[in-house]
Image: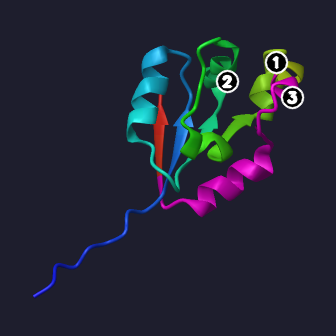
């Protein structure tokens, strides 16, 4: 007799809050295969000197270009080498993941 195991479905984590707790809570639940999208006030995390993503999630983290530009942070994010997401990329990320969680 063998137990049937189902693969974990990937999740898009929307980090919409600038609080440290929003980021810590998100990272505690994010797993390889997931993606992170920093939007709204969540883009402010890029300004924190202690901001670090786990290696397994670095290539899966995106920052809303519109929200960065609205806060005058577009150039800062580009110099830092962050992956920027235009609206079209946001739509792709939503289609790519079965689940979506918002952290605020």
The outermost residue toward the left is: 1
How far apart marks 2 and 3 lie (CA) works out to 13 Å
How far apart marks 2 and 1 lie (CA) works out to 9 Å
Q: Do the numbered discs 2 and 1 sit on residues whose CB atoms are within 8 Å?
A: yes
| Residue 44, percent from left and from top | 66, 17
Counting residues from the start of the chain, the first of labels 2 and 1 encountered is 2
Crowd band around label 2 with a 10 angstrom C-alpha radius: few (<14), some (14–19), many (20+): many
The outermost residue toward the bottom is: 1
Residue name at image x 56 percent, y 17 percent:
18
Task: Confirm whether residue 36 shows in the render.
Answer: no
| Residue 72, percent from left and from top | 84, 15
The part of the image, by quadrant, that contains residue 62 is top right
| Residue 92, percent from left and from top | 70, 58
* Relative to 44, residue 26 above or below: below
Residue name at image x 54 percent, y 59 percent:
97
Question: Which mark is on residue 78?
Answer: 3
Tell us which disc is closer to us: 2 or 3. Answer: 3
Q: Do the numbered discs 3 and 1 sit on residues whose CB atoms are within 8 Å?
A: no
Tell us which disc is closer to us: 3 or 1. Answer: 3
Q: Which residue is mark 1?
A: 73
Q: Which residue is mark 2?
A: 43
Crowd band around label 3 with a 10 angstrom C-alpha radius: few (<14), some (14–19), many (20+): few
The part of the image, by quadrant, that contains residue 8 is bottom left
Residue name at image x 54 percent, y 36 percent:
54
The stretch of residues the image draws in magenta is 77-99
């Amino acid at each position: 007799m063998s137990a049937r195991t189902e693969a974990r479905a990937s999740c898009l984590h929307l980090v919409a809050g600038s609080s440290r707790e929003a980021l810590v809570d998100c990272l505690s639940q994010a797993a390889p295969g997931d993606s992170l999208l920093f939007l709204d006030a969540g883009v402010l995390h890029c300004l924190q000197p202690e901001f670090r993503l786990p290696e397994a999630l670095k290539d899966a983290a995106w920052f809303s270009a519109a929200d960065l530009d609205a806060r005058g942070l577009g150039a800062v994010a580009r110099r830092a080498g962050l992956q920027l997401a235009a609206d079209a990329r946001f739509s792709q990320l939503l289609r790519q993941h079965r689940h979506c969680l918002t952290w605020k």
